[in-house]
Image: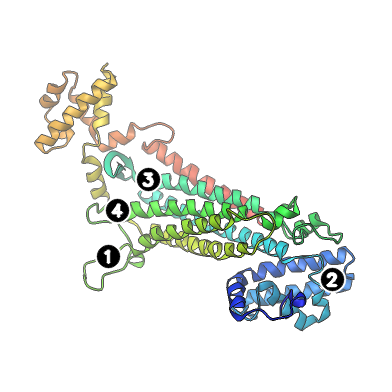
Amino acid sequence: MSLWGGRFERAPDALFRRFGDSLRFDRALGEADLTASAAWARELGHAGVLSADDAERLATEIERLRAEVASGAVVIPGEGAEDVHSWAEEVLTARLGDLARRLHTGRSRNDQVATDLRLWLRDALDERRVEIGRVRDALLRLAGREGDAIFPGYTHLQRAQPILFGHWCLAWDEALARDAARLGDARRRASACPLGSGALAGSAWPIDRDRLAASLGFESATRNSLDAVSARDFVLEALSAMAICGTTLSRIAEDLIFYASGEAGFIELGDEVTSGSSLMPQKKNPDALELIRGRAGRLIGALMTVLVVVKGLPSAYNKDLQEDKEPLFDAMAHGGMALRMLAIVLDSVLLHRDAARAAAQGGHANATDLADYLVERGVPFRTAHELAGRAVRLALSRGVSLEALPLDDLRSISALIDADVLPRLTPEAVVSRRNVHGGTAPARVHAALEAARARLDLEGAARGRAAP
């Protein structure tokens, strides 16, 4: 059934129909479309367009159809109608006759699809934030069971300074918390209701748009009808937040892939998230993490696609905006899957403490502490830095660690060095000295872990209270 054919004498070309029809993907909006349509039917009753009985009868049938779609009793097909809006109207017309044909009074597909998309996105963003919470919970569980282990910290992929493994876990919890906050910000700006904006100029019927928005759980009605039907910055913001989150997931995956490599050997991943080789029997490949890393490209690509679609569009609705949905649906689906997968991977991690400690002790990662020791004895830091570097060079020439150098060799570099330097150069001493807010000292990491758990619990409770 066409919603617009009266002005035309000839039917659309078959290829044009296939080219323009969107039911194959916008059927994902089916439940959101029916939710908005039920609210619209009741608002038509409030406005006097429909009698109270007709409005309720229409709204009730729409809600019945929505429940059938949600349960799977009715399956929205992938073809046969121009879009999900025409499919819904066709089904309702078959059930209710002319009453269903009155539903679209005062409404355009322009404000209809903008409303549907915001409703769908609001739920999708809530789901992603829950999934981020589960990844963070897995990180905190990992920190709880392995967080006190000495671990090598890296810069430039070179061993830098020892840290606690819990410090690594909490670093990614911070990043994911910001990702969740960005998704929350995107949700707030998506929570404005375009319905009642018509095609671009507003509805000609006395619709109470504030009441309509409230009935759909929106925070407000949009303020300008022309902006409401054409704005897709709420899609861009959501995709941007998802792309940034994707880079976070990719970087976590990269760390873990390296840590699980034969060259590092700090962790082992569970059999349930790894695969073997069709040729090499010994292989245990980090496929889940590599796919998480790869999926970040899809999220970034989705953002770029929609940015390019909207960059040159004039005001009001243009058919180009049909191209916003597939990238958005794809990004939300694959981003959600990556989040769920990462939580499982993190729960599977087995830490090899001895290997991690040995790596943290190697590479002369305690050189800064030797410099700090000299600073405490009155040496300017730049001079102390140079002296510590000379000590590293000597240790390299001897093939030993800094703390394994004989005290006489150390004193040959500076007479200020005494036997009390050696306890200062152990990995445990090095991490313990980073006893500042945000540092890797055991007490700081323990306190940070407790605070992170409390924040995560609080954020989960807040999401529950805010859910419409």
Q: For residue 391, which quarter of the picture?
A: top left
Q: Which label belongs to residue 55?
A: 2
Mark 3 and mark 1: span between their CA atoms? 24 Å
Mark 2 and mark 4: span between their CA atoms? 61 Å
Q: Amino acid at mark 1?
A: Lys
Q: Which label belongs to residue 284?
A: 1
Looking at the rendered image, the disc whose residue lies closer to the viewer, 2 or 1, is: 2
Which of the two labelled residues, at mark 2 and mark 4, occupies the earlier sequence position? 2
Label 4: element kind: helix
Q: Is residue 406 left or right of residue 322?
A: left
For the N terminus, the quadrant is bottom right
For the point 32% across and 62% down, the residue is: 286
Mark 4 and mark 1: span between their CA atoms? 13 Å
Which of the two labelled residues, at mark 2 and mark 3, occupies the earlier sequence position? 2
Mark 2 and mark 3: span between their CA atoms? 58 Å
Question: Is residue 435 shown above or below 5?
Answer: above
Please indicate, yes or no, whether residue 457 appears anywhere in the rendered image: no
Residue 285 locus on image (x, y percent)? 29, 64
User: Do callouts 4 and 1 mark residues in contact (Cβ within 8 Å)?
Assistant: no
For the C terminus, the quadrant is bottom right
Label 3: element kind: helix
- Nearer to me, 177 or 443: 177
- Nearer to me, 336 or 354: 336
Q: Amino acid at mark 3?
A: Trp
Label 2: element kind: helix
Residue, disc 3: 168
Q: Residues within 10 Å of mark 4 (few under 14, many from 20)?
A: some
Mark 4 and mark 3: span between their CA atoms? 14 Å
Q: Is residue 68 left or right of residue 52?
A: left
Mark 2 and mark 1: span between their CA atoms? 62 Å
